[in-house]
């Protein structure tokens, strides 16, 4: 099993950050290759909810395993290329929120792909996507503050 950890600071409060994280319509704003999300069975911040994330014609079924809004979310995801679990913690830190995300991959090909996605911080890697999320969330907070 591969284990990969990434972190970022977001200049926005945990409630806003968590709310944006579970907004599946916005996922494609920071997760590389996402074209849509379908088959959402319930609230994303509730254990047992399932949904399908599409990367073009490839899909990845996701299940929420554990949720403690606005502090924690754990999901199980998978397709033939990348499968495993993701856990995310949202903690108040200074002027915003610290996000700590851990991916655990399972299987030979998912472990190889997980290692590739864990290398570097360019867009499309685990860290790159988290950095992009932090940028989007901070901008969202600025927009909300101006209202």
Image: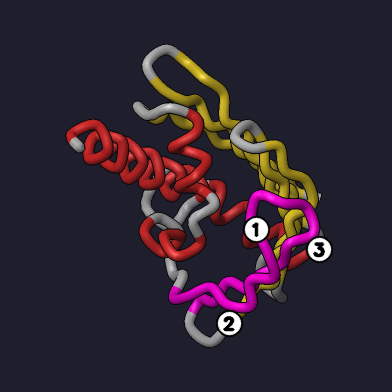
Q: Residue at x 36, y 41 (%)?
A: 137
Discs 3/2, front: 2
Closest to the observer, 1 or 64 = 64
Please identify the quarter of the rendering in which residue 32 is found: bottom left
Instruction: Name the residue carrying label 3.
Output: 107
The correct choice, above or below, for 42 with respect to 14 in the image is below
Q: Is residue 116 left or right of residue 11?
A: right
Please identify the quarter of the rendering in which residue 66 is found: top right
The correct choice, above or below, for 30 with respect to 141 in the image is below
Residue 61, image x, y percentages: 69, 72
Please identify the quarter of the rendering in which residue 113 is found: bottom right
Q: Residue at x 42, y 47 (%)?
A: 128
Instruction: Name the residue carrying label 1.
Output: 43
Q: Earlier in the sequence, mark 3 or mark 1?
A: 1
Range of the magenta residues? Answer: 35-55
- The answer to whether the residues at label 3 and label 2 have Cβ atoms under 8 Å apart is no
Residue 85, image x, y percentages: 74, 52
């Amino acid at each position: 099993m591969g284990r990969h950890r990434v972190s970022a600071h977001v200049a926005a409060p945990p409630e806003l950050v968590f709310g944006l994280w579970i907004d599946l319509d916005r996922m494609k704003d920071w997760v590389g290759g996402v074209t849509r999300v379908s088959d959402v069975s319930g609230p994303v911040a509730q254990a047992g909810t399932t949904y399908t994330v599409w990367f073009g014609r490839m899909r990845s079924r996701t299940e929420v395993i554990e949720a403690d809004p606005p502090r924690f979310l754990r999901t199980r995801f998978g397709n033939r290329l990348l499968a495993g679990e993701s856990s995310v913690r949202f903690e108040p830190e200074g002027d915003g929120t610290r996000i700590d995300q851990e991916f655990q991959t399972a299987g030979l090909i998912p472990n190889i792909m997980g290692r590739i996605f864990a290398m570097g911080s360019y867009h499309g890697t685990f860290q790159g996507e988290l950095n992009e999320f932090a940028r989007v969330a901070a901008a969202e907070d600025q927009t909300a503050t101006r209202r």
